[in-house]
Image (cartoon, rainbow, N blue to C red):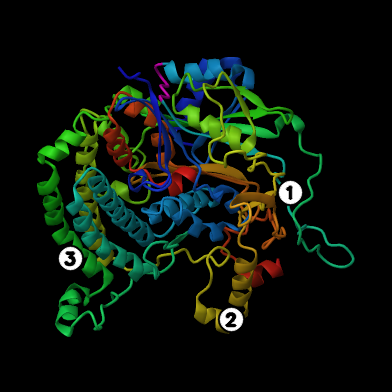
Amino acid sequence: MSKKNTALLTTLADILGERLVSSSDALHEITIEILSDDLLSVMRLLKEVESLQFHQLIDLSAVDYLEYGKADWQTQSASSDGFSRGVGATEISDSVEKSRRFCVVYHLLSVEHNYRLRVKCYLGEESPRLHSVAEIWAVADWYEREAFDLFGILFDNHPDLRRILTDYGFIGHPFRKDFPLEGYVEVRYDPEKKRVVNQPVSIEPRTLVPKVIREEDWLHSSKSLSEVEDA
Amino acid sequence: MPEIRNLTMNFGPQHPAAHGVLRLILEMDGEVIERADPHIGLLHRGTEKLAENKPYNQSIGYMDRLDYVSMMCNEHAYVLAIEKLLQITPPVRAQYIRVMFDEVTRILNHLMWLGAHGLDIGAMTMFLYCFREREDLMDCYEAVSGTRMHATYYRPGGVYRDLPETMPQYEVSKWRSEKEVQKLNENRSGSLLDFLQDFVDRFPACVDEYETLLTDNRIWKQRTVDIGIVTPERALELGFTGPMLRGSGVVWDLRKKQPYEVYRELDFDIPVGTNGDCYDRYLVRVEEMRQSAKIIGQCINWLKVNPGPVILQDPKLVAPDRESMKGDMESLIHHFKLFTEGYCVPRGEAYAAVEHPKGEFGIYLVSDGANKPYRVKARASGFAHLSAMNEMVQGHMLSDVVAVIGTMDIVFGEVDR
C-alpha cells in the first residue's frame, strides 16, 4: 500500500464519515462503496473538496453480478462417473442477493492531486435506479445512456435518457447476464418486402470453452507439474 | 417574403467526412448550427460481451479492432489489466518493445488523423504525404507480428516474440523493375531496429514538410483557429483526455504522471496548447509525433545492446515453444491446457489505463477467478470526446462541423465498441 493511497483513504474517511459503507486498497487501487441515496451528495463532495478535487469522471460502467463466481464445470468435486463436463451455459439460480445484483462503477480522476478513485454503488434487481450525475460531470450524460441501454439502469433527472449503442427499436438490455450472447433477433434483407426485416435468431447457442474457476494459486509458483503431483 | 425557419439536417452515416459511421442530426438556423445530436452505435459489435465469453487470451485480437488505427495501444491496456490482476511484471526488454511499439502506433495514428483531417478541410496533399510514411510503420507491424494492422502482438507476461532480424523485402514484378526494387529495399537490408532507426532519422524532416504545408497556411488557419474552443475547466468536466485536454492547456499525460512500463526512464516532452481550439490541438499532435520519434530512438538504443527474454517463462501462462512441445510430455500438457481452457485469473477488479494516441484508453476488468473475464469495460476516449460534439459545434457554421469531427480524432471502432 503506497503512502499516497493511505493518505487518500484517511481523507475520504474524514470527509465522508458515515456515508462511506466500505473502502479498500487492492492492487494499488482505491475502491469505496456508497449507498445509492447518498450518491449525489458524496459525488459533489468528491468533486468540490479542496483536498480531493475529482474534476474528471473517467468512466462510468455497470456490472451485472448475476453469475458471479458460478462456473460451468465443477473442478473440485468428482461424482462416480468422473468430473462433470460443462458443455452448456450455466443455469441461473436464484441464489444471488437480489438487492446487490447490479453495480454502477464510477472511475474518478483528480488531475490536481493525481489521485484515482473507484466508487461503487450497488442496486437491486427490481427496477434498478439511481440519481444521475450529469449535473456534476457533463460527460456522465452519455455514459449513463450507455448503462441504461446495455443494463437497463434508470437514472433520475437525466437530461435525455435514450438508447445509445443498440439499434433503433431494440428490445432488451443486452449486457445483462441473462441476455443470451446470440440475442433474440437477427436481421436480413427481404427481397419481397424490399426492406430489412427482423426475424427470430437462427444460430444455436454454443459454448466453445466452458467457464472454469480454479482457485489454486499455481500461477506464481514456479513448481513444475511433477512437483505438484508429488505434493 | 418567404418564411424563414429552422432546418433539421441529416449528416451521415455514409459521409466521407464522418470518419466512419457517424450520424448527426443537425438543427440549423440558416448555416449556423443550433443543436447537434450524434447518433452512434452503428458499429456496435458487443466487444465487451464477446470478451466475457472467451478465455482471456482470445480477446487480445478483439482489442485491436476497437480503435483500428492504433491497434497495439488497445492491446496494451487490456494486457496491463490482466497483468495487474495476476500481479506479474513482464521482462524489461518486453517493456521496451511495448513502449517502442506504442510510440510507433502513436505516429501511425497521428499520421492517419493528420491526413484525414487535412483532407476533410481541403488539404488533399496531406493525405498522400502522411500515407507515404505510414506505409513504413505498417511494415514494422508486419515484420514483428505478421499482419499489417491487427497485430495481437502483446501478451500477458510480455510480447509474442522477439524483434525480427530481417525486414520483409519488395520483390521484382511486372510493375516494379529490379532497379526500383533495389532502391526500395535499401533500408531494409538490416534488422527491424535498423529500419526503424532509419525511419526515426528521416521522420523529423517529414514532419517539417507537413508543417510547411499547413502550419502557416492561411486557409488552414482560417479553418481551424478559434474553431471549437474548449476552456480547461470545461475540458475536464467533459471528460477530455489526451491531446484534446492538452490542447486546452491542461498539463496531463499518463506517461509522465502515472508512468507505466519504462516511460520513467525515457526523456521526452509533453506539448501543451493555450487556446483550446482546433489549431492548438493540431500543433499538439504534430509535436507529439516528433516526441514519439525521439522516444523510439531511445528505445532502439537500449534494445540494441540489451538482449534477453521478451516474455515470462511461466508455463501456466505462456505457451511452451514448439520444440519442447514436440519432445516433452509436460510441455504438451501445458500447451493443451492453455489452448483448451486458458488460465484462471484471481478474483478481483482492476483498471489499467494507457496514454493512447487519442487520450486515456482504459480497461476495467472484473474477475471471479475464472478463465474468462467476468466483465470487461473499455473506456474509450473517443466516446467522451464525441459526447461533447453538441457543445463544441453550437454557433459554428456547417462546414466547421467537419473541422470539429476531424479535431476530435474520432474512430468508430472504439466509440461504438
Magenta region includes residue A52: yes
Q: Quadrant of residue B172?
A: bottom left
The label nearer to you, 2 versus 3, is: 3
Q: Residues within 10 Å of mark 1 (few under 14, many from 20)?
A: some
Element at label 1:
loop
Which quadrant would the N terminus of chain B be assigned to in this image? top left
Q: In the rendered image of this protein, does residue B386 appear above or below residue B289?
A: above
Q: Is residue A179 left or right of residue B416?
A: right
Q: Residues within 10 Å of mark 3 (few under 14, many from 20)?
A: some
Q: Amino acid at mark 3?
A: Asp
Viewer-proximal residue among B177 and B245: B177
The residue that mark 3 highlights is B198
Q: In the rendered image of this protein, does residue A156 appear above or below residue B72?
A: above
Magenta region includes residue B10: no
Looking at marks 2 and 3 on the same chain, the residue that comes earlier in the sequence is marked by 3
Q: Can residue B352 be seen at all in this image of the molecule?
A: no
**Label 3, label 1: how many angstroms apart (C-alpha)?**
53 Å
Q: Work out whether disc 2 and disc 1 sit on a shared chain.
A: no
Element at label 2:
loop
The residue that mark 1 highlights is A70
Magenta segment, which residues?
Answer: A50-55
The residue that mark 2 highlights is B328
Q: What is the magenta segment's predominant secondary structure? A: loop
Q: Amino acid at mark 1?
A: Lys
Viewer-proximal residue among B171 and B331: B171
The label nearer to you, 2 versus 1, is: 1
Could you tell me which residue is drawn at 81 percent across and 64 percent down? A83
Element at label 3:
helix
